[in-house]
Image (tube, rainbow, N blue to C red):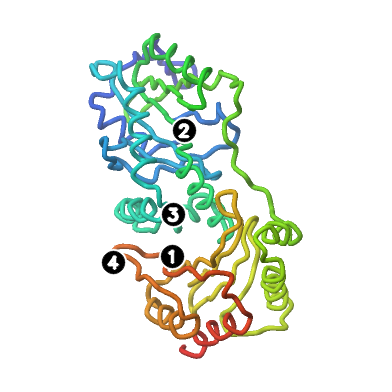
Amino acid sequence: MSIIVSKNGKGAVKLNKIPFGLEDNIQQYIYNNPESIPLYDIKEDVQLLILAREFSTQSGPIDALGVDIDGEIYLVETKLYKNPDKRTVVAQVLDYGASLWKSHPNFDSFLLKLNTSVQEAFHQTVRERLQSFFALDESGVETLILNMSENLEEGNFKFVVLMDTIHDQLKDLILYINQNSKFNIYGVELEYYKHNEFEIIIPKLFGAEVKKDVASKKTDTTHISNDEFIELYSSMGLKDLIQEILSVEKQINEGNIKINGMTARRTPKNINFTYVKPGDKLGSLVLCLGYNKRLPSKTFDFWLYDKEIQEKVLLAVRDTLKIQTNQLAPDAKYGVIARWPIKEFTQDKLMAFFSYLSNKE
């Protein structure tokens, strides 16, 4: 294929497709320009954020690892047509997915590793990068991260095979797999042209035309109401306790309970008690309880987002709640530092914990 470029109807120049050169060139181009992957043919208004390049697994490095606003995880593998491995590229990308799923049964370990890559590339944490790229508030970021966690746990990935030329056998294989399995594999062919200082890319997507008999997993954005929270925890024999927790949340929001820096709010599936240190724009610490991985959580998870107050928070947890704590890893900027069984919850303990933080400023 060739294209014609002209200016004001004159000086037409015929451009022929040219090779990318090296596979590294395609990888870098996708890393810098993820919108060149035509995911809009899969779902409307999708934006892909590439979080890491050469993300290591036990089976080898994933060329690019990305995510969209729904928390869908994308594994992108690039190959040149001249590469003899192109015949096994589907098996290779599935192998990477299996390795990623198997080696990170705990989402915290995956997030920690991903955080290292994002900090090196963008000088931001994963959370900060997601928030700035997708223009999300704190609630939206937490929902996105929760969806990523569920997709990782279930090994629910979207695989993208990206090449300068996709041969017919690979197109047939992608269609066959998509039609007869729960996998979502897409082939992207990039035609590359250059004219003066301009680069012209024509992307073509293969695999999205398949209509699956078995629907792929969709992100659960259901908002759990107070009544549904109570029903969920009633099945665990904790009806009175969850009603007390919801009552405390309501009192804080109505201003009947006031502690400096303490707020309460709801996300679609969670009850959150948040502490904001003076000068911080977002929550410095969030106590999160809710509907996680299709089950009601049995603990308040203490998510620390400001490492400067780590020692104070750890002391507050140990002194007022008498539960085990864990320091963040040296290279982690945020994560879970404690889990408080909700069976041990009382309003007095919660207030004592937040008062401890407030009084230590």
- In the image, residue 335 lies at what x, y percent? 42, 63
| Numbered disc 2: secondary structure | strand
Q: Which residue is mark 1?
A: 336
Q: Nearer the viewer, residue 69 or 132?
A: 69
How far apart are labels 1 and 3 at the CA level?
19 Å
- Horizontal side of 25 relative to 167 (left or right) equals left
How far apart are labels 2 and 1 at the CA level?
27 Å
- In the image, residue 50 lies at what x, y percent? 40, 42
Front tag of 1 and 3: 1
| Numbered disc 4: secondary structure | loop
Whichever of labels 2 and 1 marks the residue nearer the N terminus, that label is 2
Whichever of labels 1 and 3 marks the residue nearer the N terminus, that label is 3
Question: At label 1, which amino acid type do we have?
Answer: Val
- Horizontal side of 299 relative to 13 (left or right) equals right
| Numbered disc 3: secondary structure | helix
Whichever of labels 3 and 4 marks the residue nearer the N terminus, that label is 3
Q: In which quadrant of the rendered image does the N terminus lie?
A: top left
Front tag of 2 and 3: 2
How far apart are labels 1 and 4 at the CA level?
14 Å
Question: At label 3, which amino acid type do we have?
Answer: Arg
Q: Nearer the viewer, residue 120 or 274?
A: 274
Q: Is mark 1 in CB contact (under 8 Å) with mark 4? A: no
